[in-house]
């Protein structure tokens, strides 16, 4: 076992195989304070902490768990059996049969003729990697992934099989489809298949019980119609009040390119494929809330490039932080980084940001759209949480917080987001802590990494994508392993990708390093066309 530092606030444990991963995961037990997520994967376990100060305790906890795992021996635990009805009608059946040198009927028989172990979650909410595919049909991924894989697709790739819980891109071989809902935010637990369970695929003709329902565990029946994912669609998540005249509410008049409700995120759900999400620039989000006296984690609006206009019913105290924008209340200019009173019926308008990307609008009392899995954050990758704000939406505002927390009127900011810092003439310098997969990179990688790069137009809340000199690396893919905010992953084309708030839970390309915590927020404020330099740190 090897433990790698994974940035400043996480640890990645290398293990020999999936059995060792499962043994360690079982041995971990209850996490100590400060550990916010544990992500088992194919041959690793990621432990993510709230702050760098929590890492020493997490490391000691890991060591104790390793000792327990090495002395307890094999487990006798048998997980819950979940049977999933499948129509074997997938477009890749013929290709898998040719690869295996058998008939399509034989592929189907070998796929449904065994039980699978739910190994780990990742990629998307409810996407659970199932191990135990018959080696005879373990065809590799497609050379070119599909841009659209339908929800409910039953697929395999190498020694793993899974069900796509929602429509998404994907490179796995599609064998069939199911109508079972794999992930439902209104179900407890939301994922039908959790790590540790056993899964059997049942051809659809054999999967109908006497009552006509699919064979799934009692109390875990798939939900159809308006349940589940449909419940997090636009109207129900965007509108929390029938009228802009309701007490303590805001009405959206304009949004600019994008306006999202964000909070501190939903940690602790990585095992079922749900990432933490939350504000992209945490420092600016926290400052805006601090200025209006909100408790940590209150929901605010994340505005991309400006252009937001909102009218307040019942009046409000607001604050702006992040990318600087011209702003006004009922036509009178107001400043950044200061508490501002808005009268009943008053309108706050934001102009466009000259530099930086994201501005945070906090309202005293916090925004109160319906929570999804314990958070009001919008995750654009997982499509969880309140839909992006649109004109006409009305969002409730919570009661003003009680207590004696100091409430500053104005807070100076040394380096406004998007502004160059002293000595930065070419572009923003983002410092990268090496590892955990430095061994995947060829000589000259460090030099190539620090070349001047340009932020590409396909950057978003998921990742900052950077053009420029390719970083030389070994060919191939890693077994899927956990990711952290700020991880610098290098795909086969050599162009670095810096993961941000809405990153996937796991990834299969090597991570050359992780941005320092202080630079992750800065990366989230870079806009397409901005220049950046990734500089490997010489000291941790």
Image (spheres, grey):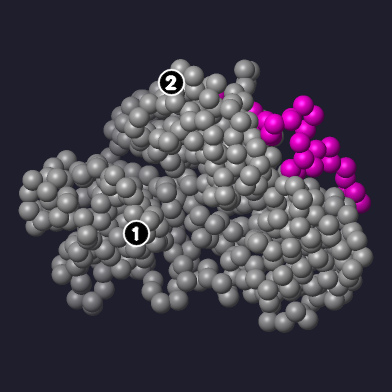
Q: Quadrant of residue 57?
A: top right
**Is residue 432 found inside the magenta-colored segment of the image?**
yes
Mark 1: few/some/many CA within 10 Å (<14, 14-19, 20+): many
Q: Is residue 517 left or right of residue 203?
A: right
Residue at 76% over, 57% down = 352
Residue 138 image point, x, y percent = 20, 43
Of residues 324 and 222, the one nearer the viewer is 324
Residue 304 image point, x, y percent = 68, 56
Q: Is residue 350 left or right of residue 434?
A: right
The residue where tag 1 is placed is: 149
Question: For residue 165, which numbered disc appears in the image?
Answer: none
Distance Cα–Cα, label 2 vs label 1: 34 Å
Q: Is residue 159 left or right of residue 482?
A: left
Q: Is residue 444 above or below residue 45?
A: above
Mark 2: few/some/many CA within 10 Å (<14, 14-19, 20+): few
Residue at 53% over, 25% down = 448
Residue 371 image point, x, y percent = 60, 63
Under tag 1, what secondary structure?
Answer: strand
What are the residue bounds of the magenta stretch?
Answer: 406-434
**Is residue 27 found inside the magenta-colored segment of the image?**
no
Quadrant of the image for the N terminus? top left
Q: Is residue 400 left or right of residue 488?
A: right
How many numbered circles are shown?
2
Of circles 2 and 1, the one toward us is 2
Of residues 36 and 452, the one nearer the viewer is 452
Magenta span main SS: loop
The residue where tag 2 is placed is: 442
Residue at 80% over, 50% down = 324
């Amino acid at each position: 076992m090897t433990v790698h530092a994974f940035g400043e606030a996480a640890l990645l444990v290398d293990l020999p195989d999936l059995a060792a991963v499962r043994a360690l995961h079982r041995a971990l037990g209850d996490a100590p304070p400060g550990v916010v997520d544990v992500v088992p994967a194919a041959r690793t376990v990621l432990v993510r902490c709230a702050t760098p100060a929590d890492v020493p305790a997490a490391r000691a906890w890991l060591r104790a768990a390793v000792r327990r795992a090495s002395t307890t021996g094999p487990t006798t635990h048998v997980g819950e059996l979940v049977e999933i009805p499948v129509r074997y009608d997938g477009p890749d059946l013929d290709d898998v049969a040719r690869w295996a040198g058998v008939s399509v009927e034989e592929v189907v028989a070998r796929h449904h003729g065994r039980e699978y172990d739910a190994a780990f979650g990742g990629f998307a909410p409810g996407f659970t990697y199932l191990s135990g595919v018959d080696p005879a049909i373990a065809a590799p991924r497609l050379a070119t992934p599909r841009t659209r894989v339908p929800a409910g697709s039953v697929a395999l790739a190498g020694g793993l099989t899974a069900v796509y819980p929602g429509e998404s891109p994907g490179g796995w071989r599609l064998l069939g489809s199911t109508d079972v809902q794999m992930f439902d935010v209104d179900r407890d637990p939301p994922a039908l298949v959790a790590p540790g369970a056993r899964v059997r695929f049942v051809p659809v003709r054999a999967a109908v019980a006497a009552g006509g329902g699919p064979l799934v565990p009692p109390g875990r029946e798939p939900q159809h119609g308006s349940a589940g994912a449909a419940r997090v669609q636009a109207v129900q998540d965007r509108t929390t009040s029938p009228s802009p005249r309701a007490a303590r509410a805001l009405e959206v008049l304009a949004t600019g390119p994008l306006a999202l409700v964000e909070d501190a995120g939903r940690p602790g759900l990585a095992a079922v494929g749900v990432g933490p999400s939350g504000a992209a620039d945490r420092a600016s989000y926290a400052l805006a809330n601090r200025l209006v006296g909100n408790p940590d984690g209150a929901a605010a609006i994340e505005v991309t490039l400006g252009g937001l206009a909102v009218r307040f019913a019942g009046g409000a105290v607001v604050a702006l932080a992040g990318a600087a924008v011209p702003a006004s209340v009922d036509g009178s200019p107001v400043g950044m980084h200061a508490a501002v009173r808005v009268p009943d019926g008053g309108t706050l308008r934001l102009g466009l940001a000259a530099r930086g990307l994201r501005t945070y609008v906090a309202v005293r009392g916090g925004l109160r759209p319906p929570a999804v899995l314990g958070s009001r954050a919008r995750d654009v990758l997982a499509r969880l949480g309140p839909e992006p704000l649109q004109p006409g939406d009305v969002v409730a505002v919570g009661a003003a917080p009680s207590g004696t927390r100091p409430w500053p009127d104005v807070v100076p900011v040394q380096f406004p987001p998007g502004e160059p810092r002293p000595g930065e003439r070419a572009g923003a310098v983002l410092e990268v802590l090496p590892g955990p997969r430095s061994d995947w990179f060829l000589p000259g990688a460090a030099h190539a990494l620090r070349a001047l790069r340009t932020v590409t137009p396909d950057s978003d809340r998921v990742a900052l994508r950077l053009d420029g000199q390719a970083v030389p690396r070994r060919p191939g893919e890693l077994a899927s392993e956990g990711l952290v905010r700020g991880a610098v992953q290098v795909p086969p084309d050599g162009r670095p990708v810096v993961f941000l708030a809405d990153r996937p839970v796991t990834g299969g390309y090597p991570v050359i390093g992780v941005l320092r915590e202080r630079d992750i927020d800065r990366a989230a404020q870079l806009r397409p066309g901005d220049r950046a330099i990734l500089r490997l740190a010489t000291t941790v």
